[in-house]
Amino acid sequence: MATLLYRLGRVAFRWRWFVTLLWVAVLGAVGFAAVKAPAAPDDGFTMPGIESQRAFDLLEQRFPGTAADGASARIVFVAPNGEKVTATENRAAIEKLVTAAADGAQVASAVDPFAAKAVSKDASTAYSTVTFKVKADDLSGAAKTHLERAIDTARDAGLTVEVGGDALATQPAAGGSAEAIGIAIAAVVLLITFGSLAAAGLPLLTAILGVGISMSAVLALGSTFGLSETTGTLATMLGLACGIDYALFVVSRYREERQKGHAPREAAGLAAGTAGSAVVFAGLTVVIALAGLSVVGIPMLTKMGLAAAGAVLLSVLISLTLVPALLGFWPDAALSRRERKKGMRRANGENGGSRWARIVVRRPIPVLLLGVIGLGAMALPALDLQLGMPGDEAKSTSTTERRAYDDLAQGFGPGFNGPLTIVVDAKKADDAKSAVATVSKEIAATGGVVSVSPARFNSAGDTAVFSATPATSPTDEKTKQLVQTIRDERSGIESKASGASFEVTGTTALNIDVAQKVQDALIPYLTLVVGLAIVLLLLVFRSLLVPLKAALGFLLSVLAALGAVVAVFQQGHGASLLGVDQTGPIMSLMPIFLVGIVFGLAMDYEVFLVSRMREAYVHGDGPGEAIVSGFRHSARVVVAAALIMMAVFSGFIGAGASMIKMIGFGLAVAVLFDAFVVRMAIAPAVLSLLGNKAWYLPSWLDRILPRMDVEGEALSRKVPAPTAGTPTAPLTPVP
């Protein structure tokens, strides 16, 4: 592989105009296709194989047209100073708002709370639901303005009016200025690492090009494969982070080869053959982790994973072709000013990385114990992990959606914001109405159910739906137990209903089912991803213990990161520092995101760092000196890569949505733990203790495994480094 990539790097360097124009043409073509492509259909969030999804599908089948996904606004009224909403003036103001709202553009209906009995027992609170004919994204500005003016009129009458639902909700930005700051920090890190504006800008330029192509491809293929901008969120995040990192490693190796005295084109070829080999295998581990998300069984997550895997593959291709091509235009600009002034120098002396490695090699046991105990302590809060899907209760109290949620909970009880929807299939019952009444009565008698609504039948009269309001909030553990209790008692209830069957759905039940499905899929997913990656690393390092050590180190870092997420977002430690107003359950998909994304990134650092150790070991260094050599050449670049990843991910902490904050924080902390504790401390300590055994591979397995030559052993024989007496390569333009 090293020889093949060496030739590819030399060809890209030589035919730099053709390679560069080809990539620009690809961007233009995909961008044009994205502009011309029809908008992707919004399939919504589906979760095959769970009860709440089956019940929802039955609703759509038996109640055609009623499961519309039009926008809605739940307007909550609270009477002032202990008054009642039923008072004459307050009631008149509410009815005036409902009448005005019903006359608005795109409105399907506006419900009078007094006619619908949507008034709390103490008459302090009432609510009206306004539904629209179109989705929230398709609402016109005039329709929103009309409703907002009607609400302002009610407020002027003295009522407290808050609005929930998606009609008037503001979608928080994914990162905003904080994300831009993250990219700026990445640029500063690159500039400090390379000491050259061109070398710092090249990884950013190529990464942005890759993200542009990836997102354009997502939009172009959206209508065909059901992709959307949301699908591309993960592709953008990883495409940017991996694109910068992969280009960073190639540029860094190019500079190193120039320092050894190689001519620019030769240095570009060697960089592609050595660092490029590591990039290929690092990219493959990320792709394995992302493509493996399909085993979870969530279509949206599968699409996100495959789109992100495509973005990572694109980053690999760009780093192997476009990066050498751009180096061909300005072969000396990638060097620092000092190197350009003084000429190439062979620097194999001590640096910060090698000095740190010598400390670890001399005292491996204390370093290992400190790292393992520290990460173990950070992982402890994960034992208290509660999965769920935060809703309006997790938003800031400055938002009207959160205040509407709180007002409804206070006026109607904490469970009112998360009612359970019971769908009764009475198609096989002799008396459908009697069977539905029996189911409703039995569920109403279940402990933890406050009330049930009147059943509503479809036009055929064979299916009914009603709501059961729990006594506890949607994210309370008791609500989860209530859903389980109702389902456990299903057989007994259905036997009394003579022929009717029922299922539990609704947002609350859906979130509970999703959390359980993700939890059940976590172990199979881990097994698949870790198993495939161990096989891949076995090919890279030709060692039994190094891949195993890499996998165990990853598990330690991801558990510590999950513990940190629980400590902040669930237990509330330091939550205010991140702008988290309300703690609650951890997003159901968070463990899967952490495992999938962080595993790929962790293997990046493993491949980049340990491949240099393997290279030194193959070329004759002892086990301890190979560790030092690997750190001498790669530690600085790995540190820069980790800081860039953390900067990019930290940008999402500035988002308005708690879930996006959680993802950004979790990924940034995971990179911190894995890069600086596991790969820079625990890994060299373990390798030092293992000595030569770290690189042991049974002879029979050595004969079976294909030789990948990631360390570039064949290249060192084919292209030996210039001897001490050989003049260094001139700093002149390359023909």
Image (spheres, helix red, strand yellow):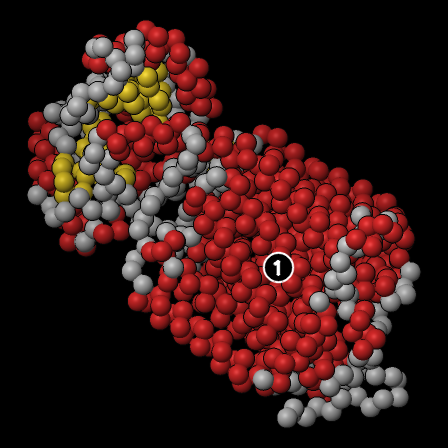
Q: Position of residue 328 (x, y in %)?
A: 62, 84
If the image is split into quadrants, where does the N terminus sit?
Answer: bottom right
Q: Is residue 160 visible?
A: no
Q: Position of residue 627 (x, y in %)?
A: 83, 59
Q: Is residue 399 left or right of residue 697?
A: left
Q: Nearer the viewer, residue 464 or 365?
A: 464
Q: Is residue 323 left or right of residue 691?
A: left
Q: Position of residue 667 (x, y in %)?
A: 57, 50
10 Å crowding of disc 1: few (<14), some (14-19), many (20+):
many
Q: Is residue 184 above or below residue 424?
A: below
Q: Nearer the viewer, residue 63 or 728?
A: 63
Q: Is residue 721 above or below residue 440?
A: below
At 71% from the left and 45% from the top, the residue drawn is 551
Residue that carries the numbered disc 1 in the rendered image: 283
Q: Is residue 501 left or right of residue 354?
A: left
Q: Is residue 553 above or below residue 283?
A: above
